[in-house]
Image (cartoon, rainbow, N blue to C red):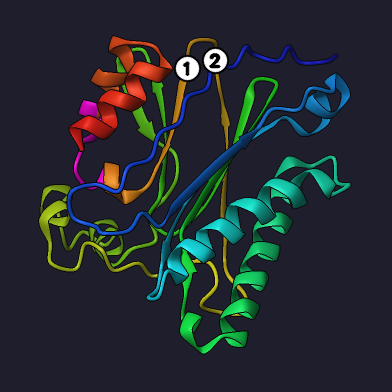
Amino acid sequence: MATKQLRLDVAQLTDVGRKREHNEDNMAYVIPKDPQVMAKKGALFIVADGMGGHAAGEVASEIAVDTVSNMYYQDDSDEVATSLLRAIKRANALIHQRAAENMLRSGMGTTCVAAVLRGNMAYIANVGDSRAYIVRGGQVKQVSQDHSWVAEQVRAGLLTEDQARTHAQRNVITRCLGTQADVEIDVFPEPIEENDALVLCTDGLSGLVTDDEIRRIVNQSGPQESVYHLVERA
């Protein structure tokens, strides 16, 4: 029996912030107009945060967003997780190749968090420390898992969450797209419900705004107002 597709309300916003001269973030979403494509592949949302000098980070994040957005829908698998993994791996290979071709872009990379919503399921994939949250009523849940030095210390019981938030090594990531020929990608299938809010963000937000603040802001208003207030708070 076909699963009913939930109604989607979408908003997005990016800002260079107070501490950076350049915005190396990129984001996109695709909501297919064809009902058959929507039923098979769902809607895709992606956020990437690039790194590297000479504007290389912006190049890396743009490649990630463009490649995943296109390759996911070109993949013929009926399995969302399979198509998503293939698309992200293709993005990794392209970024790695472009970096090898241009010395100024050597070592460029990007984080990536992507979500596909199909029926009553979300399939969330991430590399790096960009995050996916689900806000459901009075609860907020980080679905993605950070690939960062401080996150590994927290999981090992060597740092608390509060210590990690202000630690000198908090911006050191242990996994990203583009710096290696291959990359390990985490995928999390997550049931979703009507009136859930899915938040995808870079560490420019999650590093400055607590999970509880995200929950409070999202619950206070609609999507467009929420993204504005979240960025303003960061």
Q: Quadrant of the C terminus?
A: top left
50 on left or right of 93: left
* Residue underneath mark 2: 193
Give the extent of the magenta segment.
206-213
Q: Do the residues bearing badges 1 and 2 touch, measured as CB atoms within 8 Å?
A: yes
For residue 123, above or below residue 31 = below
Residue 105 location (% of width, % of height): 49, 80
Residue 46 showing in the rendered view: no
* Residue underneath mark 1: 196
For residue 93, above or below residue 164 = below
| Residue 158 on the magenta segment | no
- Where disc 1 sits, the SS reads loop
Question: Which residue type carries mark 1?
Answer: Asp
Question: Which residue type carries mark 2?
Answer: Glu
Seen at 51% across and 44% down, the residue is 27
Quadrant position of residue 31: top right
Q: CA distance from mark 1 to mark 2?
A: 6 Å
Q: Quadrant of the N terminus?
A: top right
For residue 96, above or below residue 226 = below
Seen at 24% across and 19% down, the residue is 216
Total marks shown come to 2
Quadrant position of residue 159: bottom left
- Where disc 2 sits, the SS reads loop
97 on left or right of 83: left
| Residue 210 on the magenta segment | yes
At label 2, counting other C-alpha atoms closer than 10 Å, the crowd grade (few under 14, some 14-19, many 20 or more) is few
* Mark identifier at residue 212: none
